[in-house]
Image (cartoon, rainbow, N blue to C red):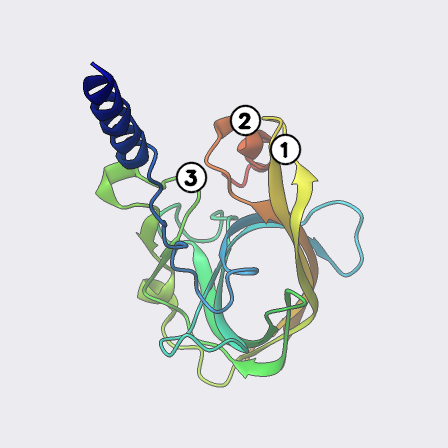
Amino acid sequence: MKKIIKLSAFAAALACLFSCETYKVDEPDMTAISGVDGKYMAFAYENGSTDPTTMFGIVITNTTDNASDAAWITISDMDYSTTHWQRLFAVRFKVSVDAKAQTFQVSESAVTEPRTAWNPYVEGAYGSYGSYYTASYQWGSFGTSTATITGGKVVTDGVTTPSGYKADSIEFNYTLTYKDGSSETYTVKGQKKTGWAEDADEYETWLSEQGLW
């Protein structure tokens, strides 16, 4: 009987050992600039105005070699009044990044207009996952146009959203200079897109009230 009890206890111990075994889970793969990359919605204030001039959809992505000191940024102007809602004006250019400080900047970076870019309001619609054709279909190449960003910064959990969750905040000063010498300067402030509809209400309502969307 004692042997049976001992064997039973041993079997129970083995069962516990195997059932309680933990397995190491690898950390998810992250880009070298994971502190700043992502999709953001932001208001743009022109020439020091306290009222938004327009709204930007912003996408920051790592470079093809996953550099820790550089990124691509695409800025889409959500004002479609001069183009078409499927042909929003968008520009793409490279910026310098301090991954640890979560900051970014650039001086007179060469600008291109991408054929497709992100539209936060059609994301997932029509199987597009937010991609849409840009105004390049109508306006062609930008040639020697440049973009300058100063004071670019992403703050982790810098915003408490209407849904009650935290989201990363983004802000920067942005100047787009066209090849004819004219320019536009904005102060840009916003947040990372969370996917919750209520977190986009402020932006969508403002665009609607301005007749921009």
Give the residue pinned by disc 2.
198
Give the residue pinned by disc 3.
121
Label at residue 134: none
Q: Is residue 71 above or below residue 21?
A: below
> Which of labels 2 and 1 is toward the front?
1
Q: Amino acid at mark 3?
A: Tyr
- Please tell me how crowded label 3 is: few (under 14), some (14-19), or many (20+) other residues with Cα within 10 Å: some
Q: Are marks 2 and 1 in contact (CB under 8 Å)?
A: yes
Callout 1 secondary element: loop
- Please tell me how crowded label 1 is: few (under 14), some (14-19), or many (20+) other residues with Cα within 10 Å: some
Q: Position of residue 60 (x, y in %)?
A: 49, 62
Q: Earlier in the sequence, mark 2 or mark 1?
A: 1
Give the residue pinned by disc 1.
161
Q: Position of residue 181 (x, y in %)?
A: 62, 82
Q: Earlier in the sequence, mark 2 or mark 3?
A: 3
Determine which quarter of the picture holds residue 187: bottom right
Q: Is residue 189 above or below residue 162?
A: below
Alpha carbon separation for disc pair 2 and 3: 13 Å
Name the image quarter holding the N terminus.
top left
Q: Residue at x 38, y 59 (%)?
A: 29
